[in-house]
């Protein structure tokens, strides 16, 4: 499956409606971004049941800012609408494959329970 272009117009729908979305935040002038692109596209072809999206941070500066992108490339992974991974830097193909396996194995009920426990603690610490 080809990668989808992520824009401010489709980001909410894509993350909400697709089970697992991997997003590559990149820019055309970025050497590591260009090196990661074929790795990302090969993974997309190998895993057609997952959604692979690419966000050109030059064209979508507001969207990149909303996601707090400070370094590119940055890879984010959403599962069932929850951000489960975010890391700047290029990943080698074997590491990306390992990550995909770990994301597939996530128990989202446990993830949501963990988030629910952490939110009151974070709110209390902020006061």
Image (cartoon, rainbow, N blue to C red):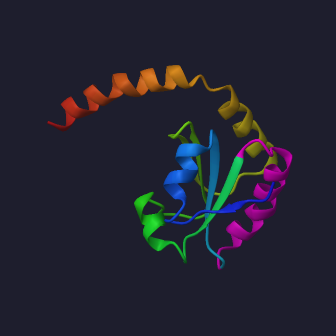
Which residue is nearer to you in this view: 6 or 65? 6
Is residue 114 in sight in this rendering?
yes
The verdict on residue 109 being magenta is no
Q: Residue at x 55, y 71 (%)?
A: 57
Task: From the viewer's perspective, tell me whether residue 73 is left or right of residue 47.
Answer: left
Which of the image's four quarters has the N terminus?
bottom right
Q: Which of the 4 image quarters holds residue 54?
A: bottom right
> Among all residues in the image, which is located at the extreme left?
127
- Residue 126 vs 29, above or below: the answer is above
- What range of the chain is rendered magenta? 29-50
Q: Position of residue 86 (x, y in %)?
A: 54, 47
- Residue 50 appears at what percent x and percent y? 72, 44
Left or right placement of residue 113 versus residue 126 in this view: right
Residue for point 69% across, 49% down: 51
Up-down: is 25 above or below 49? below
Please state the horizontal and vertical placement of residue 94, each as a whole percent of the image. Answer: 81, 43
Where residue 14 sits: x, y (%)?
58, 52
Residue at the image position 65 percent from the left and 74 percent from the top: 30
State the predominant SS element of the stretch in magenta: helix
In the foreground, 15 or 83: 15
Given residues 66 and 18, the one toward you in this image is 18
Left or right: where does residue 8 sit relative to residue 36? Answer: left
């Amino acid at each position: 499956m080809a990668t989808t272009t992520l824009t401010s117009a489709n980001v909410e729908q894509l993350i909400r409606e697709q089970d697992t979305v991997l997003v590559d935040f990149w820019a055309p002038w970025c050497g590591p971004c260009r090196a990661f692109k074929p790795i990302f596209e090969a993974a997309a072809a190998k895993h057609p049941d997952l959604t692979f999206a690419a966000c050109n941070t030059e064209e979508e500066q507001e969207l990149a800012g909303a996601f707090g992108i400070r370094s590119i490339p940055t890879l984010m992974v959403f599962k069932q609408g929850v951000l489960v991974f975010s890391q700047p830097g290029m990943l080698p193909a074997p590491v990306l494959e390992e990550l995909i396996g770990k994301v597939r194995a996530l128990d989202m009920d446990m993830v949501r329970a963990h988030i629910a426990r952490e939110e009151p603690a974070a709110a209390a610490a902020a006061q």
